[in-house]
Amino acid sequence: MRFEVAGVRGQDLRVNVTGSVVRLRGVRRAPPTGAIDRLQQMEISFGPFEREILVQTSFDADAVRARLEDGFLEVRIPKRGPSRRTLPIETD
């Protein structure tokens, strides 16, 4: 998964995994007063935000990793391989 989070600091982001839902929460803080007063138009929303993504495939929640780089948050969700095991045969 890749999220555009330009202007958001890593300390203002949280990624939680609950069951098959990956939740991204964060806050894009407004610049200090006066820093944007001279702009004619700005297409950036400030304040808190949240995204919930339902992952449709089986994955290993303990192996999920998140990395913030160049304004993008990448969340890697490794698929869980097919589980295999040999069952013991019960006898009387």
Image (cartoon, rainbow, N blue to C red):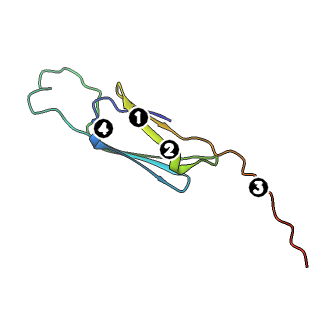
Position of residue 17 measured from the top left corner of the image (x, y, whole percent) = 47, 52
Q: Residues within 10 Å of mark 4 (few under 14, many from 20)?
A: some
Position of residue 9 measured from the top left corner of the image (x, y, whole percent) = 27, 36
Q: CA distance from mark 3 to mark 4?
A: 40 Å
Q: Which amino acid, mark 4?
A: Gly
Of the 4 image quadrants, the one containing the C terminus is: bottom right
Residue highlighted by disc 3: 85
Residue highlighted by disc 2: 64
Residue projecting furthest to the left: 34
Tell me, for residue 54, which label it has, or none: none
Q: Which circle's residue, 3 or 1, is located before the other in the chain?
A: 1
Position of residue 26 measured from the top left corner of the image (x, y, whole percent) = 32, 44
Residue highlighted by disc 1: 67
Q: CA distance from mark 4 to mark 2?
A: 17 Å
Tell me, for residue 10, which label it has, or none: 4
Q: CA distance from mark 4 to mark 1?
A: 9 Å
Task: Residue at 76% x, 55% y: name it.
Answer: 85
Q: Which circle's residue, 3 or 4, is located before the other in the chain?
A: 4
| Tag nearer the camera, 3 or 4 | 3
- Tell me, yes or no, whether the two marked residues, 3 and 1, touch with CB atoms within 8 Å: no
* SS at badge 1: strand
Question: Relative to residue 32, is residue 46 drawn left or right?
Answer: right
Q: Which amino acid, mark 3?
A: Arg
Q: Which amino acid, mark 1?
A: Arg
Q: Quadrant of residue 70?
A: top left
Q: Which circle's residue, 4 or 1, is located before the other in the chain?
A: 4
